[in-house]
Amino acid sequence: MQSLLSFVPDFLKQELFWVMALLVFAIWQFIQNKLRMDVVALIVMLFFSLTNILSVKEVLAGLSDPNVVLIALLFIVGEGLVRTGVANQVSDWLMRVSGASETKVLVLLMLCIAGLGSFMSSTGIVAIFIPVVLAICSGMGISPRRLMMPLSVAGLISGMMTLIATPPNLVAHSELVKSGFEGFNFFSFTPIGLIILVMGIGYMLIARRWLDNGEQSNTHSQAQKFSMSQLIEEYQLKERAKMVLVEADSDCVGKSIGQLNLRIEQGLNIIAIQRTKRFRKITVSASVNEIFQPKDILLLDTALDDETYQQRCEQLKLRPIELKGEYFSSQYRSVGMAEISVMPEAECIGKTIRELKFRSRYHLSIVGLKRGDEIIQEELLDTPLKFGDILLVMGVWQQIHRMDDDHRDFFLLRDPAESKKRPSGVKPSPSRSVLSADYGVADDYRHCAKRDGSVDCLLNVRQVPLCGYEKCL
């Protein structure tokens, strides 16, 4: 190493040279504005620390207070809880054990929020639980006000639970240490926080009855009426759901869904793909151009018997995985289903699903077809579509609601109550809200289609989604 350094010019060994070089680099990056200013600053700090030009203490001294670093690390801890799925698993557990008892829901909700908020941002944890609370209120038929207020109160109380729960705790700790006193330990605030939490739960159990003025959730009837379980039973999908893991040596790796054509050649219909990206699980739509990667988890719909299914998995080097819940019901946060209807005078009438290249166009998969009272499963891809047909599509929620923007051939007839539990980033379509919630078009449409199937009958109904979409109603 010393022999190599002997060939380095003397000016490169001077700390002043590197300080000036980093200063020029920082100024140039600020002018370019390609990297964020905070990222440039952190790069400079990291270089000073790694080259021993400055010690770690000297580097952090530029932040004026070590609490800034602690608060930044707090955000990292919170994001880690979200990405690893801890927060979402707690919310799923809450919905599973709460049952129909509002008192039990309130107590468990406040305990969960206070517990998770002790180690991550209370604002973030409240945001995660908002759709969960709305779904619980919808299912129980109560006003969201009765649980939204306890949600907020528990988020505030969580700041009293641990040292890192809120920045003021860290600031107080730092000032005590600077003044020569002993600082707080991690759980110094916990006894007081627990007392306040118990008092807060007791208060909300009493005060909740005055929060809603006796009003009921207006989505209760719809939540009870439409659910994934109902659609699964109606379209005879039980026992059809499978999950497999793509092995590293599988023939599928590096190939696209369109190249393998598993649905036609192997009888395996891919609904969605789950994979790990940046330490978190994501769900991607099963588009024809999606490339299989090692350790991908495929959500499949198949009518194959168990023996044939095992043979196909061995042939393709796919490892079967146990599926929890009923037909992907445990995957409702990312994967959903909805009924769509063929529009009158649509170009798709008379064509088969295979001819329409439905997956290529909408990145969704059709798993059922209803024609009157008949459910068609056999030769589904080669069945010509008729006026009044209702199709059950499956895929990621984003693609389902994005499809409703196109009214040329199909429109979204109804989706299950689980769509209300989707992640906050997935927004419902405005026309879907008009159709299913405000005007009840879904029932009218189906009734008309079954009654006589006349063009005039359905043309009248057709005008409702179009007017609703333009908000003229």
Image (cartoon, grey):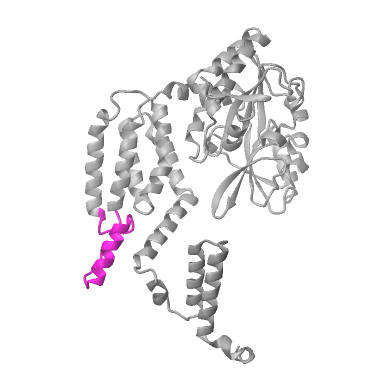
Left or right side of 473 for 292: right
Left or right side of 336 for 371: right
432 vs 188: above or below: above
- Asked if residue 107 can be seen in this view, the reply is no
Question: Hey, which quadrant is residue 179 in on the image?
Answer: bottom left
Let me know if residue 189 is in the magenta part.
Answer: yes
User: What is the x, y in percent for residue 257?
Assistant: 73, 42
255 vs 162: above or below: above
Left or right side of 319 for 127: left
Q: Residue furthest front?
A: 31
- Asked if residue 212 can be seen in this view, the reply is yes
Question: In the image shown, does 143 or 34 lie closer to the viewer?
Answer: 34
Residue drawn at 55 percent across, 66 percent down: 31
Let me know if residue 96 is in the magenta part.
Answer: no
Question: Hey, which quadrant is residue 214 in on the image?
Answer: top left
User: What is the x, y in percent for residue 148?
Assistant: 34, 36
Left or right side of 460 for 82: left
User: What is the x, y in percent for residue 455?
Assistant: 68, 11
User: What is the x, y in percent for residue 448?
Assistant: 61, 11
Residue drawn at 54 percent across, 38 percent down: 331
Question: In the image shown, does 413 or 59 lie closer to the viewer?
Answer: 59
Q: Which residues are magenta?
A: 161-190
Question: Hey, which quadrant is residue 128 in on the image?
Answer: top left
228 vs 77: above or below: above
Quadrant, the N terminus: bottom right
Residue drawn at 58 percent across, 26 percent down: 232
Q: Residue furthest top?
A: 452
